[in-house]
Amino acid sequence: MFRRYGRIVRERALWNFPVVSLLERRDIEKVLKHQSKFPLRPPTEVLAWYRQSRPDRYTTLGLVNEQGEKWHMLRSVLTPELTSAKTILRFLPELNQVIEDFISVLRTTRDKRDVVSGFEESVNRMGLESTCTLILGRRMGFLEREVDALANRLAAAVKGHFRASRDTFYGLPFWKVIPTRSYKLLVKSEEEIYDIVSDLVESALKEERDSCAMDAVNSIFMSVLKAPGLDIREKKAAIIDFIASGMQTLGNTLVFVLYLIAKNPRVQERLYEEILQVAPGRCPLTAETIRRANYLQACVMEAFRVLPVAPCVARILESDMELSGYVVSAGTVVLCHTWLACQEEANFTAAQEFLPERWLQKGEMTRTSPFLVVPFGCGRRICPGKRFVEQELHLAVAKIVREFHVDFEGELQIQFEFLLSPKAPTNFIFHDRMN
Ligand code: HEM
């Protein structure tokens, strides 16, 4: 598209609605730097449509899809615990355990050549397990050999939700007129997730009502349940949104980071040496270990530049803005193609190479392009899961690289499924390290 039409492209989407795509760094920075009290991000239309059809279950469109004052109110009451550095730090022992369990799954699913076929399945289970532990305050057992029926139902429903969101996204929204197959799948999975979350919420409320103690593991769940001024429907919707946001994003990202490390042996060896230095043998990985592992942080950051799960950041312009010499009017949906901009030589030297060193100055992490490498978005609508995700990725990559020499069979194929996703099956090879 950009090759054909230039660095700013206007398309007429459904019902003549203008959508402008940006590739030019200056334009992207201008849009993302724009200060706004209530930044507008275009909602996922099908979810908004479905939620509006169920006032018995939803009073708003939820944190992800709501706008303006309503969004601001939800954000202020629902996310402080999730974004708190203290909360995420206290969650580290639990997260360590989830990752240990994940490593055990890898060991047991390896074949004789140490290949884990369909790695993406296991990694998505890990993403769901860690997100649920964080948000629901309890282990769900997605990583156990015998996954229990409830966990299986939830995993299948979250998968269905993503597939249906993707399939209803393209083409004309016939589902507004008659319920298409994809729309029915969306409704079915939304209802399933809602019923499961609802049961968990109700039982937590019944058992522990006023006396419920906040501890490291259930503090986010309890903070949502105790959020002031919100209807119970809103609280359940928030929990659903958190779980759905975390599952596939986390899994896909871990596939991408490990793939890039596997395909760059020099990077893998330097990373392994760093980890041995900061956490030798089998000594536990702590927040301090991660803080000192600068190369590890640089590897994750570079992976976000090369293969981010969210390839662009979307906004609705709140006022007219001049972009590449054109006046783009207020109300236009603007897609900032940060991923493509990150692959341009003008923005990053040796842009096609995986070079974590580019993020280090005298061995310390630096951030040189805050508005181009924005895996979690930016400004007031930035992903509230960022701190948790970074902690999880650093911990998981450090543990895996300390335990295994990682390799990958063939080349990774990528597809755009709403998010950037690896095409299944992904076959990783995990050789035990001899330490
Ligand atoms: C690798 C993992 C993840 C990535 C790459 C990611 C990325 C993003 C991005 C790009 C946005 C849009 C930000 C913007 O418009 O500026 C977003 C929003 C959001 N994310 Fe994440 N996310 C991840 C994991 C999570 C997790 C684990 C949670 C919850 C525990 C979460 C909850 C949310 C929510 C609720 C929003 C909407 C925020 C708002 O509109 O105020 N995400 N995420």
Image (cartoon, rainbow, N blue to C red):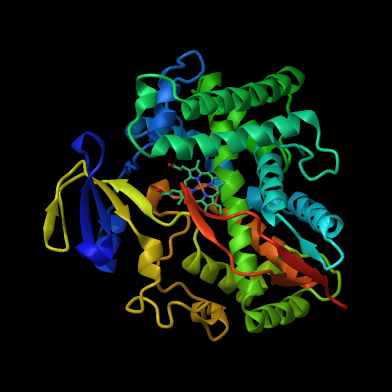
Asked if 129 appears above or below 223 in the picture, the reply is below
* Residue farthest bottom in this picture: 362
Q: Which residue is depicted at the point 35% across and 19% down?
A: 177
The image position of residue 152, as x and y in percent, is 73, 34
Res. 390 visible in picture: no
In the displayed structure image, the side of residue 273 where residue 12 appears, left or right: left
In the displayed structure image, the side of residue 375 where residue 11 appears, left or right: left
Q: In front here: 331 or 232?
A: 331
Q: Which residue is depicted at the point 43% across and 34% down?
A: 168
Res. 412 image quadrant: bottom right
The image position of residue 267, as x and y in percent, is 63, 80
Q: In front here: 161 or 435?
A: 161
Asked if 48 appears above or below 269 in the picture, the reply is above
In the displayed structure image, the side of residue 201 where residue 330 appears, left or right: left
Res. 246 image quadrant: top right
Res. 27 image quadrant: bottom left
Q: In front here: 66 or 255?
A: 255
- The quadrant the N terminus occupies is bottom left
The image position of residue 140, as x and y in percent, is 76, 37
- The quadrant the C terminus occupies is bottom right
Query: Across the whole image, how many numbered discs are drawn on residues?
Result: 0
The image position of residue 219, as x and y in percent, is 67, 38
Asked if 431 appears above or below 192 in the picture, the reply is below
Asked if 149 appears above or below 423 in the picture, the reply is above
Res. 292 visible in picture: yes
